[in-house]
Amino acid sequence: MAEISFPLPDLGEGLIEATVLEWLVSPGEQVERNQPLVEVETTKSAVELPSPQAGKVVRIYGGPGDKINVGEPLIVFEVPDNTAGIVGTVPKEEAPKRRVRLSAVLDED
Amino acid sequence: MSNSILEGANATGDDTATNTAADSPAPTTVMSMQQALNRALDEVLADNPKAVIFGEDCGRLGGVFRITDGLQAKHGAQRVFDTPLAESGILGMSVGLAMAGFHPIPEVQFDGFAYPAINQIVCQIARMNYRSRGTMPMPITLRVPSFGGIRAPEHHGESLEALFAHVPGLKVVSPSNPHEAYHLLKYAATRPDPVIFMEPKSRYWQKGEVDAATHDAGGGSPTGAKVMREGRHLTLVAWGAMVSRCLQVAELAAEDGIDIEVLDLRWLKPIDAEALTASVRKTRRAVVVHEAPLTSGLGAEVAQLITQSCFDTLKAAVERVTGFDVPYPSGDLEDEYIPNIDRILFGIQRVLEYKRG
């Protein structure tokens, strides 16, 4: 298993920090991609952050009222080693299948 | 011992992974191609203080395929770092670093993004040694996650080996399994010449035994091809991800009584013509398999090298089983494009059926 950290992204227009209002997931929980993770408040608005990926939550940073700077860790996921990169999917290992059979008379000269 | 620093590393950079291959060389270990490449790069950085690794997301994130995972935390942001999304800049910077005595190991994140850097690769990197009469070598190891098989969007899966192989001054190599990946990358990263290192991204997760101490147990040159399976009736020539598919085909063909030899070309420039000759002189039949389109693909070069040295003993013209002459398709159509087991078997059957006169 490998751990992947997700830092607080820039929530728009050069904001440098956000305040945690409420965590919607907790450590140990399995989350899906785009599932709401946390509600945070910036100087402009309160927003829900969707999960960038699927995985098991290992750690969350900050409780309600805590400020987190953009770029600092927000949440850490645990994912299997064979998880795909950010683009594409891991090819499935399948038993080789075929429809074609070979037929040949081989002269062993 | 730890397979690689992947295990203890995370993208926050606060890991304390120290139990790495560089500290204690181990005998055979089972690892994925990702881990093998990661370990090779770790050792290259430890061995050569002039080696530097950079590219899009190579540093803090550890690469989109995790190949450079943990390396920045271990070797520092001076030696493993992120670049802007600008391939021409990544390769242009490599030229300057090489001139200044470094050994750059840049990464182009996906093969389709090598195109914006073609000017730097072809006009600068490939020629500088020639242009400077040997006073300005370009020891650059360019890692390019290559070929298809992961259902990625457009530009994320291509087969550029013929393009690179056509450029004088470049060397081109592609590993087929974790063991080859580990050794070929370590070898490439010690060359004084620019090497295009084409990593078959569909095989990144494939696990296999890596014998760190010995590359070719049966002898053989690190610059040569390698017989992956011996056979009597026909030689399948392949490289990169197609090698494991050809090995599967050989197993199936054995059920039909056909004994197939699989030759992993490994180096696509220069091509090991002697190994091709030795294999096909024995089997007298050959089929070349590649993912790239047919026309002007490397299969034509391989077929000519075989024909030139084995013309008098060949039982049939060399067959090519390849991708089609179309732009690399989107993920949904990938299975129709990449040579599959049946297409390779058909190619073999055409050669077996051939009758002279």
Image (tube, helix red, strand yellow):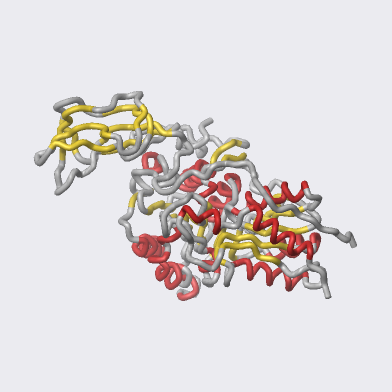
Residue B18 in view, yes or no: no
Q: In this rendering, is residue B148 above or below B118?
A: above
Q: B308 or B152: nearer the eye?
A: B152
- Where is residue B37 shown, x and y percent of the image? 51, 46
Q: Is residue B43 left or right of residue B208?
A: left
**For the image shown, how many numbered marks are present on the structure?**
0
- Where is residue A54 shown, x and y percent of the image? 37, 36
Q: B13 or B279: nearer the eye?
A: B279
Question: Which residue is pictured at 54% across the width and 71% down the height?
Answer: B166
Question: Looking at the image, which residue sits at the far left?
Answer: A43
- Where is residue A65 shown, x and y percent of the image? 14, 27
Q: Is residue B355 left or right of residue B34?
A: right
Q: B94 or B158: nearer the eye?
A: B158
Q: B5 or A95: nearer the eye?
A: A95
- Where is residue A67 shown, x and y percent of the image? 15, 32
Residue B86 in view, yes or no: yes
Q: Quadrant of the C terminus of chain B?
A: bottom right
Hey, which quadrant is residue A68 in on the image? top left
Hey, which quadrant is residue A29 in on the image? top left
Question: Looking at the image, which residue sits at the far front?
Answer: A99
Question: Which residue is pictured at 23% across the width and 42% down the height?
Answer: A9
